Image: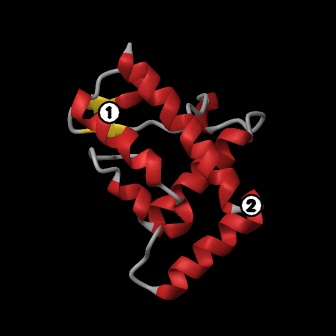
Amino acid sequence: MIVDQRALPLTRSWCLFELLQTFLLADQTSVPTAGNVKFEGLFLCSSTGVLNLGQASVDVSLGIARRLKTLSLKDAEASKKADKEMIDDLVIEKMGDFTTINKKLFSNLNAALRAAQS
């Protein structure tokens, strides 16, 4: 996922949909991918590098950390109300509630921020 220091993609419903698909695929570890390539999960990329690999700038890392304090994926927005409703319903169907997907996201972001700290 491409992010900036404000982590704006995490406020958009379609990005939430992509995040959900990433988490679902990551949970299916026994499912082989094309060419038997191992699925690596969520990578957070910025204009300064890949956060998970410790390559992103301090500004990007701090911005994402700040966004984490107030982030709730339930608040994600879409241009079309029907899109938001469909995506929210899918999150609830697949994850049970927004708390679960928020926890998965926070876990992934925390791991990425720890890597950036190294």
Mark 2 Cα shell of 10 Å, populated few (<14), some (14-19), many (≥20): few
In the image, taking residue 14 as reference, residue 33 lies left or right, namely: right
**Residue 4 appears left or right of 66:** left
In the rendered image, residue 76, in percent from the top left (x then y), is placed at: 47, 68
Instruction: Examine the rendering and report whether any part of residue 27 can be seen.
Output: yes
Q: Position of residue 24 (x, y in %)?
A: 68, 49
Residue found at the far top of this picture: 118
- In the image, residue 75 sits, relative to residue 114, either above or below, namely below
Q: Quadrant of the C terminus?
A: top left
Q: Mark 2: which secondary structure?
A: helix
Can you tell which mark lies on residue 94?
2
114 or 52: nearer the viewer: 114
Q: Residue at x 43, y 20 (%)?
A: 115
x 49%, y 86%: residue: 81
Which circle's residue, 1 or 2, is located before the other in the chain?
1
Q: Give the answer, above or below, for where 63 lies relative to 49.
A: below
User: Could you tell me the amino acid type at mark 1?
Assistant: Ser
